[in-house]
Image (tube, grey):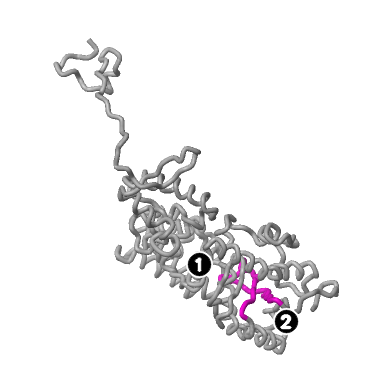
């Protein structure tokens, strides 16, 4: 394996088609293996894979995607073998881009550990607390595209997968003993489906906070221009901010120009005027946005509830926090505030309405808001959900008479006899 200092390392470097084919044949025989990626996307729209790490019980390999096409590894990821990863969200996007697939059977150790009480743990945290292993620290500014990589860089990259299988097995054993393994499996399946969900350019404007607050026709312009920017960035494989900054989209949506000369005077556009077909496309997007049919406007989903439901949302949120502590589950994994609001609004795709979340939270919240259940203090500072007694303890008493001499005349009605309360 090539290194900056020539020192030998306990892992194999794969940088030729023959070596890759041998690796693919080995993976095809396995029931379980793990992977990780190192990538960059600072200067591109799509993530650029710089290193692929794979490990199984008998070996650890580092694949150089700058030297070899990794697509022949695709069948191994969809063979039905359990593929282990940690915090796999971005890795799945990178793998799909480089290999044309994502694992059909994924086990994410970060997600699964959330069901054991860990709150979005790093791999280093889990390795230390569960395996007693201290992983080497890496430099987050490392350029993984450089060659040769140093011994320290290779050691750090290999450590991302070397301990994943023992860690995953220990987590699975503890989840199985607690009766929660199915919950973790369901959650990991959601990662698989989310990884391949197509991005809709028409919703790209939702990512721009200031633009989300626009009203009227400005929203249509923002939607059309942001969609144009997203498609252009993808076509050119450039970061969206280099095509047109967020501030420029806000300015264009607020004061739609009809020509490039008018556009030059807007904030954020300085020096970013497109040329040729791109300029024509941008102007067309502006015109399209101004005439956009309101029915075609993709409004960001609301993350709030109606005013009358806010007390219920606050009450349920407090109980969910208590439930997470009682069950030793990461609160953000159990239910976010957005999840609670979606359930209370009756959204058809609310996460709390199905699966393990529906059993733990959704069904009980419905009982609470329908009046079948109540939340009470448990006498020790905690909260519990219990069957409602239907016996009200509300205190009622007659209203006290108004002291007209002490009352502020600006805040009370005149006395019944019509006299002036100040006299």
Between 161 and 385, the one lying in front of the other is 385
Secondary structure of the magenta portion, mostly? Answer: strand
The picture places residue 378, in percent across and down from the top left corner, at 46, 41
Placement of 75 over or under 132, stated as above or below: below
Disc 2: CA contacts within 10 A as few (<14), some (14-19) or many (>=20)? many
Front: mark 2 or 1: 1
Instruction: Give the side of residue 118 with respect to residue 379, left or right.
Output: right
According to the image, label 1 marks what residue? 182
Residue farthest left in this picture: 417
The picture places residue 235, in percent across and down from the top left corner, at 52, 75
Look at the image and tell me in which quarter the N terminus lies: bottom right
* Span shown in magenta: 31-57
Q: Confirm whether the magenta stretch covers residue 202.
A: no
In which quarter of the view is residue 178 placed?
Answer: bottom right
- Going from the N terminus, do you reach mark 2 or mark 1 first? 2
Which residue is rendered at x = 61% and y = 68% of the image?
41
Q: Secondary structure at mark 1?
A: helix
């Amino acid at each position: 394996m090539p290194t900056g200092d020539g020192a030998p390392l306990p892992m194999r470097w794969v940088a030729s088609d023959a070596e890759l084919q041998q690796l693919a044949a080995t993976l095809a025989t396995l029931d379980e293996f793990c992977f990780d990626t190192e990538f960059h996307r600072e200067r591109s729209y799509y993530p650029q894979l710089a290193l692929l790490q794979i490990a199984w019980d008998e070996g650890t390999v580092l694949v150089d995607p700058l030297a070899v096409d990794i697509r022949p590894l695709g069948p191994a990821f969809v063979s039905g073998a359990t593929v282990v990863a940690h915090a796999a969200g971005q890795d799945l996007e990178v793998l799909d881009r480089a290999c044309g697939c994502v694992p059909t059977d994924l086990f994410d150790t970060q997600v699964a550990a959330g069901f054991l009480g860990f709150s979005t743990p790093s791999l280093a945290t889990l390795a230390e607390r569960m395996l007693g292993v201290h992983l080497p620290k890496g430099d987050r500014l490392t350029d993984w595209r450089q060659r040769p990589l140093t011994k320290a860089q290779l050691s750090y990259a290999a450590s991302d997968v070397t301990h994943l299988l023992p860690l995953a097995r220990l987590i699975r054993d503890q989840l199985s003993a607690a009766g929660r393994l199915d919950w973790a499996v369901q959650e990991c399946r959601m990662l698989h489906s989310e990884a391949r969900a197509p991005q809709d350019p028409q919703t790209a404007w939702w990512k721009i906070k200031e633009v989300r607050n626009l009203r009227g026709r400005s929203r249509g312009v923002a939607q059309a221009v942001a969609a144009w920017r997203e498609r252009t960035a993808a076509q050119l494989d450039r970061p969206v901010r280099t095509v047109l900054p967020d501030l420029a989209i806000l300015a264009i949506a607020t004061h739609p120009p009809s020509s490039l000369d008018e556009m030059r005077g807007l904030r954020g556009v300085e020096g970013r005027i497109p040329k040729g077909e791109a300029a024509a496309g941008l102007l067309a997007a502006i015109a399209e946005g101004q005439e956009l049919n309101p029915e075609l406007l993709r409004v960001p989903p609301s993350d709030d509830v109606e005013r009358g439901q806010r007390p219920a949302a606050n009450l349920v949120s407090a109980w969910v926090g208590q439930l997470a502590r009682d069950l030793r589950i990461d609160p953000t994994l159990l239910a976010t505030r957005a999840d609670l609001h979606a359930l209370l609004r009756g959204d058809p795709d609310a996460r709390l309405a199905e699966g393990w979340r529906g059993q733990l939270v959704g069904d009980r919240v419905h009982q609470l808001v329908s009046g079948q259940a109540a939340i009470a203090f448990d006498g020790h500072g905690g909260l519990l959900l219990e069957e409602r007694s239907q016996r009200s303890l509300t205190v009622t008493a007659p209203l006290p008479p108004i002291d007209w001499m002490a009352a502020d005349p600006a805040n009370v009605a005149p006395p019944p006899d019509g006299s002036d309360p100040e006299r």
